[in-house]
Amino acid sequence: MLFRIAIAAVLVLWATPTLRAGEKARPNFLVILCDDLGYGDLGCYGHAHIKTPNLDRLAKEGIRFTSGYSSAPVCSPSRAGLLTSKIPTRMGIYDWINPGNSVHLRADEITVATLLRRAGYATAHVGKWHLNGRFNQADQPQPGDHGFDHWMSTQNNAGPSHKNPVNFVRNGKAVGPTQGYSCQLVADEALRWLDDQKKSDKPFFLYVCFHEPHEPVESPPGLVARHGNVNPNEAQYYANVENVDLAVGRLLKKLDDLNVAENTLVVFTSDNGPETLNRYKGGSRSYGSVGIFRGRKLHLYEGGIRVPWIIRWNGKVPPGQTSPVPISNLDILPTLCALAKVDLPKDRVLDGTSLVPLLRGQELQRPRPLFWHYYRSLSEPKAAMRVGDWMILGHWDGDIQGAGIGVKQGDAEKIKAARLTKFELYNLKDDPSQTKDVARQQPKLLAELAQQFQARYEEVLREAPVWQVPPDKKKAKPAK
């Protein structure tokens, strides 16, 4: 109860007047995030079987990025990075958040939704949340506490599967059993909310987080039947992505029907790379593609963090572009705030960069190189940094083993104590598949990048919090 009162008091202090006439020209924002969608899973990114006409059209009408990244190779950290423009480790979102865990996106973190809501935007989150362990409980922040006026969300995946999920919560109240497939149910809610905005003079920020194609995968039989030339589990995956494409098509049509498409910036991306087939029980339908890249979800090689990335802004951004410029979901907050004429927080480090110059056809200057940290990576590198065409990856001396099992007792202390001990170096322009580690052939460059890399690594870890995570199967305690 005290937590809710404190949040309400802060929101009152941050409140701003309703938009006045003349301010409606500020753009609307639709950000669409998929779950475990691989770089090569769309038609416009080269998939030979999956048909995604709506997303292909979105790419043709805007910019398709070939070096678009997530901020982590796993879900909760990536989502935290997207909303806050901060490297997830800074916030203690070290891994996916399992139910009941004390790890959460803390109340003092400022999201893009909070910034836009302060500035008079209507805001909504629909779909997967996955930024707290105690979902829909008063002792941890919920979507409404992080800037969303309206939300219909799940803690993690759609359950029991994408078909007829029963675990949605709308504005704090359980929705109960549903009929249909998750991405279409999420689209239904988003469309209803957009219709509700018709009489409002506020611009909007709509954050749509599809559960697909994360396991457990379940797809409409009619879409599955289109892929009779592959095994049934593979067909399920292909149909799953195609169902997302249909849902995206419905969202784009609604923007047209409401005559707001010309003033709505649309972003489409994924939270990380695709899951490894049969990595765990029930993961038999993970047939995502990384294209030519090395690694998958839970790796810091390109396949774990390089994802589909599309931006469309009709009439403002010239269509038909393909860009090799490296960008990240960390860039979403500063980009949207710049376009909405919203000041960035001055009391914290933001790791993203506004993409507005790039959208205007100018060169993008990135003062802080892109950086990743994931302590439970399946492969040896636990941190990575990209500078120009170069990607440096660092091994460490930590003793934590096992990927994707969530933050356990003692993890944070070990994370903060670990040091980088060995490096790999790749030229992504010449070797995008990361087949040739040139660390030994480039000693001078390696020394320069390693020094910068070490400094960034240590700076990020200094800010990382230590959570009071109890032993498994016991009630979690609040974070320090």
Image (tube, helix red, strand yellow):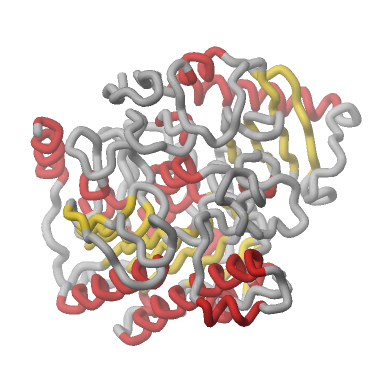
Q: Quadrant of residue 445?
A: top right
Q: Can you give x and y, in whole percent of width and height, for residue 437 in the image?
A: 84, 35
Give the answer, above or below, for where 445 lies relative to 287.
above
Res 346 seen here = no
Kindly give the residue lying farthest to the bottom in the view shown: 257
Residue 192 rendering spot, x and y as whole percentages: 25, 74
Residue in the foreground of this view, choosing between 472 and 444: 472
Decide: is 467 above or below 328.
above
Residue at 20% x, 72% y: name it: 22
Picture residue at 58% right of the left edge, 36% below the top: 372
Quadrant of the image occupied by residue 235: bottom right
**Viewed as shown, does residue 248 lie left or right of 152?**
right
Q: Nearer the viewer, residue 43 or 364?
A: 43
Q: Quadrant of the N terminus?
A: top left
Residue at (57%, 28%) from the top-left corner? 375
Task: Tell me where residue 259 sits by quadrant.
Answer: bottom left
In the orientation shown, which residue stands out farthest toward the right? 441
Nearer to me, 367 or 253:
253
- Residue 328 lies left or right of residue 248; in this view the side is right
Q: Quadrant of the C terminus?
A: top left
Q: Is residue 373 left or right of residue 8?
A: right
Question: Does 130 sit above or below residue 122?
Answer: above
Q: Where residue 258 appears, x then y in whole percent?
A: 29, 83
Whether residue 102 can be seen here: yes
x, y percentage for residue 317?
51, 72
Residue at x-position 47% and y-position 32%: 406
